[in-house]
Amino acid sequence: MTALIDRFNRKIEYLRLSVTDRCDFRCFYCIPKGFKGFTEVEDRLKLDEFIRLIRVFSEMGVSKVRLTGGEPLIHKDIEVMVRGIAALPDIEDFSMSTNASHLAQHARMLKDTGVGRINVSLDSLNSEVFRQITQGDLNKVIDGLMEAKRVDLYPIKINMVVMRDLNLHEVGDMVDFCIKNRFTLRFIETMPVGAAGQEARDRYVPMDEVRQILEQRFKLEPARMKGAGPAKYFKIVDKRIKIGFITPMSQHFCEDCNRVRLSSEGTLYLCLGQQDKLELKPLLRKGLSDDQLKDEILAAIQRKPEKHEFNTNPDQVVRVMSMTGG
């Protein structure tokens, strides 16, 4: 097996797969208002191509796969895809990011087919604020979370993008909600990815400010979390909860980056905040062997940038967040 190690000696072992760039929500920091440039079904990778690429990556040392989008649970073949990935012998950590609007219908399937955990985007517990952010129905999300909890699809992580003059005042309420339901909570800074992300920059809140707000109510102390990725975790003394802070803007974590992203149309993005990429769909359809695909992937990994430039060059990433895979 040829390990995926880039020129900065980072071992790439995590693949995030955007199974579709479409979503039934329209979070204003993700998809620009009126955007219609989604990938057509005929331009996406076929199911067997998705599975083949994940198998190839797993043979190169990728052991962690997360399905994302857009919204992965609206993909018509999501159950077949989940079963196919779960059957790969070298995938040790298989998870999904979802907005949970369809989770009530699929939670049991995810549990039974081998998805080990889920991350749910939930930016507000107020139905009006939630609709302002997502144009979606909060009740569907809560129903999905409760069904996931009922079928014991744990651990469940809640991701809250914190935004000034919108939901910053809710951070304490979200902690209470997660304590009550035994969810892990992660607060995230806004990122200038695409036109929508750039428009949300005025609402940026550094995580140090969020932490200071929480410390007025709770006693926090550092904690460890298996598979924590970029989050820095704390626990609340005397409570069964861990809280993560993800800081792509104020304290970037690029030196430890171990991930790449594969879009639904077969584009391998080497960095969320850069344009470097490898188009894999044409290579698949030219009939390249697995070994030839691995050579192309290895060469691309050597082009993986050292870091993003969200702070110094925030306007350079023009693709929609859902296209990249979050």
Image (cartoon, grey):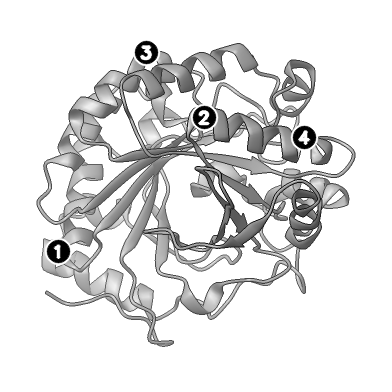
Q: Secondary structure at mark 2?
A: loop
Q: Secondary structure at mark 1?
A: helix
Is residue 134 shown left or right of residue 258?
right
Q: Are marks 2 and 3 in contact (CB under 8 Å)?
A: no
Q: Which residue is mark 2?
A: 22
Relative vertical location of residue 195 with respect to residue 311 in this rendering, above or below:
above
Relative vertical location of residue 221 with respect to residue 119 in this rendering, above or below:
below
Q: Secondary structure at mark 3?
A: helix
The dot on residue 247 is none
Closer to the eye: label 2 or 3:
3
N-terminal label among 3 and 1: 1
Closer to the eye: label 4 or 2:
4
Q: Secondary structure at mark 4?
A: helix
Q: CA separation, marks 3 and 4?
A: 28 Å
**Residue type at numbered disc 3:** Gln
Q: Which residue is mark 1?
A: 59
Is residue 326 shown left or right of residue 58?
right
Q: CA separation, marks 2 and 3?
A: 19 Å
Q: Are marks 3 and 1 in contact (CB under 8 Å)?
A: no
**Residue type at numbered disc 2:** Arg
Q: Which residue is mark 4?
A: 170
Looking at the image, which is closer to me, 104 or 221?
221
**Residue type at numbered disc 4:** Glu
N-terminal label among 4 and 2: 2
